[in-house]
Image (spheres, rainbow, N blue to C red):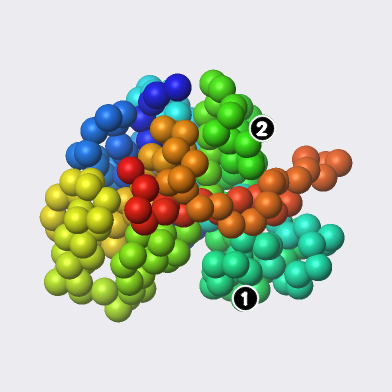
Amino acid sequence: MQGNILAVDLASKKYKDIGFALLPAGAVEVIFLKAEELGLSGKPYASDLAPALNQFCLDRDVKVLILDGPQGWKSPHTGIEHMRIGERVLNTPAKTGVIGHVKPGSALRYVAFSISLFHSLRVDFGWSLLTRNWHTAKRKRWLVEGFPTSAWKTLGLSSLPAKSRTKRKELNQWADEFKIVSGLHVGSNLTHDDLQAAVLLPAAIAIQSQNVNGVVLSGMDPRYTWSGDVLEGWIANPYVNDAL
């Protein structure tokens, strides 16, 4: 089932720090959006962002929505301490522990915000979390977890430096390199948030086209507690040779 793709680089302090990258079906020109275009301003809350994202996706026929942030908590039964399996594999800076626990503690708001957003999109609006058999499922709207730092690496590039350490010249350099390896046209003078959203798109393209060789999954199928919380889940990254 063809449709458009939306990639979102999340932030939990200000809506203006969230990056939105829209890729229409069959296109190579990426459209970058601002939070204001979704009617969002101020401090992000899942209760505001989830319905805004869902309505935008309905209006724009988005079938794959990929977000930079954890979808669930750690399962207590994996044998790995303090983090989910996918986070261990990809060495994410924030470690999502069992429900309510995050390392470092300063990342708790961001992690809880992301998990709440995934929960609302899944429960309130019918999006489906990625599972091992994603390529055999029909008529799903996939809700996918990505991680820009590792997406740059699986595309064969160096990870984009932190926002505070990245200057305009470097942003333009990374944008040019991304265009070469991905085939996507991202324009110039992009923000750090724009680029971090854009780098999630190749994995989503592979999922949209059911190209199992174009995406690498880290983690395990999401599990659900009796109260409806999600544990674990897959983190999707593009495969450098077959991402498109």
Q: Position of residue 220 (x, y in %)?
A: 68, 52
**Where is the N terminus found, in terms of image quarters?**
top left
Q: Would you identify the image quadrant in which residue 226 lies?
A: top right
- Could you give the CA–CA distance between mark 1 and mark 2, rounded to whole angstroms? 28 Å
Q: Would you identify the image quadrant in which residue 124 lies?
A: top right
Asked if 210 appears above or below 18 in the picture, the reply is above
Asked if 189 appears above or below 67 in the picture, the reply is below
Q: Are marks 1 and 2 in contact (CB under 8 Å)?
A: no
Q: Residue at x 55, y 67 (%)?
A: 90
Q: Position of residue 5 (x, y in %)?
A: 38, 35
Residue type at tag 2: Val
Element at label 1: loop
**Where is the C terminus found, in terms of image quarters?**
top left
Q: Is residue 122 left or right of residue 31?
A: right
Pick whichever, 196 or 19, lies toward us: 196
Q: Which mark is residue 194?
A: none
Q: Position of residue 9 (x, y in %)?
A: 41, 53
Q: Which mark is residue 104?
A: 1
Element at label 2: helix
Label 2: how many Cα within 10 Å (few below 14, some 14–19, many 20+)? few
Q: Residue at x 57, y 44 (%)?
A: 117
Q: Residue at x 58, y 29 (%)?
A: 136
Q: Position of residue 195 (x, y in %)?
A: 29, 57
Q: Is residue 36 left or right of residue 148?
A: left
Q: Is residue 218 visible?
A: yes
Name which of mark 1 and mark 2 comes first in the sequence.
1
Q: Which mark is residue 123?
A: 2
